[in-house]
Image (cartoon, grey):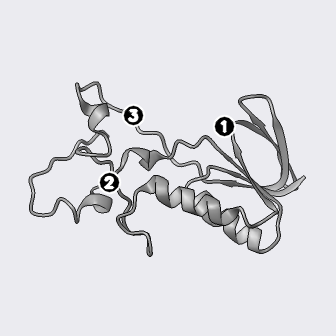
Amino acid sequence: MDDVIIIGGSFAGLAAALQLGRARRKATILDTGLPRNRFAGHSHGLLGHDHKPPLDILAEARQQLARYPTVKLINARADSISGTIDNFAVLTGDGESFGARRLILSYGVADQMPDVPGFAESWGTSIVPCPYCDGFEVADQHWGLVWSG
């Protein structure tokens, strides 16, 4: 049984895994390899990595985690969680089960695309999900906001 299972292996999940690995805690990261920002050309606001492609940042982080023998990265989707503190079980889509004393949920959100021709193809390039993240790059240009709610 692991100390921690981390569901989601993007920036937050990998940062948590780094600290757990350095503390020699057994941690398993379950991740599909499909981060929300995978369509973006660049990430911003992450010190030391500003304007780098997000997939490059993740690849570098995974490479750094490889030096910690107590941290495992499993390419799988967590489908269900059961149990209580000190005895959690996580079942993946392919039927594998993982146990841990604690859980970290860092799986983020899934964007819902409107049914507009070309919208999905432009997502992360000319249509961006975060005006704060990409505002600097579009300053002094015309831009719009899609709002639902």
- Determine the secondary structure under disc 1: loop
At label 1, the amino acid type is Arg
Task: Answer with mark 1 or mark 2, whichever residue precedes in sequence.
Answer: 1
Q: Looking at the picture, which amino acid does disc 2 mark? A: Cys
Residue 43: in sight, yes or no? Answer: yes
Q: Which mark is residue 77?
A: 1
Instruction: Name the residue that disc number 2 marks.
Output: 130
Is residue 64 left or right of 82 when viewed as pictured? left
Pinpoint residue 127: horizontal percent, then vertical percent: 25, 44
Q: Is residue 22 left or right of residue 112?
A: right
Circles 1 and 2: CB atoms closer than 8 Å: no
Foreground residue among 108 and 83: 108
Horizontal side of 143 relative to 135 (left or right) equals left
- Residue 17 position in % (x across, y down): 69, 63
Disc sitting over residue 112 in the figure: 3
Q: Residues within 10 Å of mark 1 (few under 14, many from 20)?
A: some
User: In the figure, 142 relative to 118: above or below?
Assistant: below
